[in-house]
Image: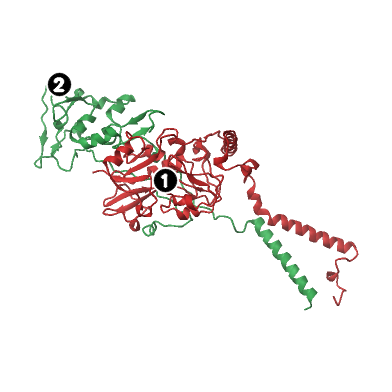
Chain colours: A red, B green
């Protein structure tokens, strides 16, 4: 401070005069404006989470009364957002039931109807597109993932020389995705379904990396579901609307199957290639298939994940 | 340049930088997802759970036009029906039956009306072992040749089974053979596939490079 003559070099404890007042006011205003503006990204966080949601306990620790409050909170949220009162349930696994899926590779024609029935049933994001089922087309002769193709789009299927293999969550008995979850937001229920608590997921995507079947999907954006296409029959661990930043995956249509119905992908399959049921019931069709058909593979059997999803062939 | 001037320069620089950043945030210059390519809503035919064809029984049940199932509006009950074959032993269909495709099996030995229809009563079907069945209850006829398939069907393993897997929760529906298979050409008809998945990134996977992506 050798030349204190210019106003810019006024020390901070300079006496208050008109010029200093205006200058500091301008600086302060600009500062606040800048601060407010730099916080602008936070505007997107409105409706991000409610206090109830933030304070919600872990799924397995919720008492029935607390669960009822949570379900009501979800119903209110959905109604606010979609203008439609959903029916959200917390369906528990049934006693003496273990679900198994069997898919007949001889019958599958690769029409992808299962993919879109699943999207409609489970309120999956339409754009960006999230799909739980991927139908692989492979040349006859072997199950070679290197030659698998899921972007096929001929005028009609099946195509000569190819077979089709739909892949979705295999509901492993030894699920790698569950092991890597740092917050226990995903776990295996006793009926064999590996579920995700969307309110507990932190979106780290470890499970997506761990899954050898590419079965888990991440909501990079808020899922978009047209209001008129929302399926109002929902389950807490199933198809209720997801937030941005959480994982999701096939849950064997928990909202249907735990209520005794077949999953949506099976209902729509035109050829009857998809079979689903209770493996603990010796009279179920899946028991019959595993007993009497050439159950050829569990996908990537060598990994020791022990899928509950079986691919088989007609003799 | 002395210390104070440097300090001032740094402060002014920081302020200008912060203000520029603030302006950029306000104007949303970056950090916004690029607008996604529109994805057309999927055609409802791809989520329709109906069977690929309508069987005669279903037509009668739903009150549709079943006049085509009444053989004796055209045929004469008293008159014996004579079938005609060409030199390759393919059956020659009359004009009234030109809508049929005769393609049961990979050879033409089964392209003979009276392998299944009863030549003495067209309202009946006949199995090879001499049983008579009503025209709209054809599944046992199919099963008389396709035994293992009938066994699978009865166990719920062949063909469509819809509704409830749990008998305690509700009923299930099973489709008849002819709800999916045309008895005259039973191979399952080719279907139009639903749209392929759209890439997550805009312009991600093009159709031509799709062969490499999996």
Label 1, label 2: how far apart the Cα atoms are: 60 Å
x and y percentages locating residue A31 in the rendered image: 76, 59
Query: Can you tell which quarter of the image residue B119 is in?
Result: top left
The answer to whether any part of residue A185 appears in the image is yes
x and y percentages locating residue A33 in the rendered image: 74, 56
Query: Can you tell which quarter of the image residue A276 is in?
Result: top left
According to the image, label 2 marks what residue?
B77
Foreground residue among B98 and A103 = A103
Query: What residue is shown at x 69% (from left), y 59% (from top)?
Result: B22
- Could you tell me which quadrant the C terminus of chain A lies in? top left
Label 1 environment density (alpha carbons within 10 Å; few <14, some 14–19, many ≥20): many
x and y percentages locating residue A131 in the rendered image: 44, 47
In the rendered view, does A115 fall on the left or right side of A240?
left
Q: Circle 1 marks a residue in which chain?
A: A
Q: Regarding mark 2 in the picture, which secondary structure is present there?
A: loop
According to the image, label 1 marks what residue?
A171
């Amino acid at each position: 401070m050798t030349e204190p003559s210019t106003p810019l070099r006024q020390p901070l404890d300079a006496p208050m005069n008109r010029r200093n007042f205006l200058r500091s006011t301008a600086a302060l205003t600009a500062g606040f404006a800048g601060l407010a503006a730099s916080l602008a990204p936070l505007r997107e966080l409105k409706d991000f989470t409610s206090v109830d949601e933030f304070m919600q306990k872990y799924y397995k620790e919720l008492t029935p009364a607390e669960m009822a409050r949570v379900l009501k909170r979800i119903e209110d949220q959905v109604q606010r957002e979609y203008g439609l009162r959903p029916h959200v349930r917390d369906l528990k696994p049934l006693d003496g039931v273990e679900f198994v899926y069997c898919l007949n590779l001889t019958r599958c024609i690769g029409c992808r109807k299962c993919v879109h029935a699943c999207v409609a049933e489970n309120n999956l994001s339409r754009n960006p597109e999230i799909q739980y089922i991927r139908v692989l087309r492979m040349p006859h002769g072997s199950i070679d993932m290197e030659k698998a193709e899921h972007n096929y789009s001929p005028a009609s299927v099946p195509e000569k020389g190819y077979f089709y293999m739909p892949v979705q969550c295999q509901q492993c008995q030894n699920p790698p995705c569950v092991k890597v979850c740092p917050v226990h937001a995903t776990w295996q229920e006793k009926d064999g379904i590996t579920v995700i608590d969307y309110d507990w997921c932190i979106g780290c995507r470890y499970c997506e990396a761990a899954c050898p079947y590419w079965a888990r999907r991440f909501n990079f954006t808020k899922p978009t579901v047209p209001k008129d296409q929302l399926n109002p029959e929902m389950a807490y661990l199933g198809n209720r609307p997801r937030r941005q930043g959480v994982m999701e995956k096939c849950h064997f249509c928990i909202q249907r199957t735990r209520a005794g119905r077949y999953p949506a992908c099976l209902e729509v399959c035109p050829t009857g290639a998809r079979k689903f049921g209770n493996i603990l019931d010796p009279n179920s069709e899946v028991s019959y298939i595993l007993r009497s058909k050439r159950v050829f593979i569990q996908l990537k059997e060598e990994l020791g994940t022990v899928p509950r999803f079986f691919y088989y062939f007609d003799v | 340049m002395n210390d104070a001037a440097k300090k001032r320069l740094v402060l002014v620089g920081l302020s200008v930088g912060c203000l520029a950043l603030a302006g950029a945030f306000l104007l949303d210059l970056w950090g916004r997802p690029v607008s996604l390519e529109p994805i057309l809503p999927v055609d409802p035919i791809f989520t329709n759970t109906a069977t690929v064809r309508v069987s005669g029984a279903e037509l009668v049940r739903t009150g549709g036009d079943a006049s085509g199932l009444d053989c004796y509006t055209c045929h004469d009950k008293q008159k014996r029906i004579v079938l005609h074959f060409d030199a390759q032993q393919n059956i020659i269909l009359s004009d009234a039956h030109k809508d049929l495709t005769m393609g049961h099996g990979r050879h033409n030995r089964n392209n003979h009306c009276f392998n299944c229809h009863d030549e003495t009563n067209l309202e009946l079907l006949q199995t090879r072992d001499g049983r008579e069945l009503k025209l709209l209850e054809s599944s046992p006829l199919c099963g008389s040749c396709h035994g293992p398939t009938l066994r699978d069907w009865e166990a719920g393993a062949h063909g469509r089974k819809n509704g409830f897997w749990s008998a305690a929760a509700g009923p299930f529906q099973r489709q008849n053979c002819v709800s999916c298979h045309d008895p005259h050409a039973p191979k399952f008809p080719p279907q139009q596939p639903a749209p392929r998945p759209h890439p997550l990134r805009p312009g991600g996977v093009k159709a031509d490079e799709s062969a490499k992506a999996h």
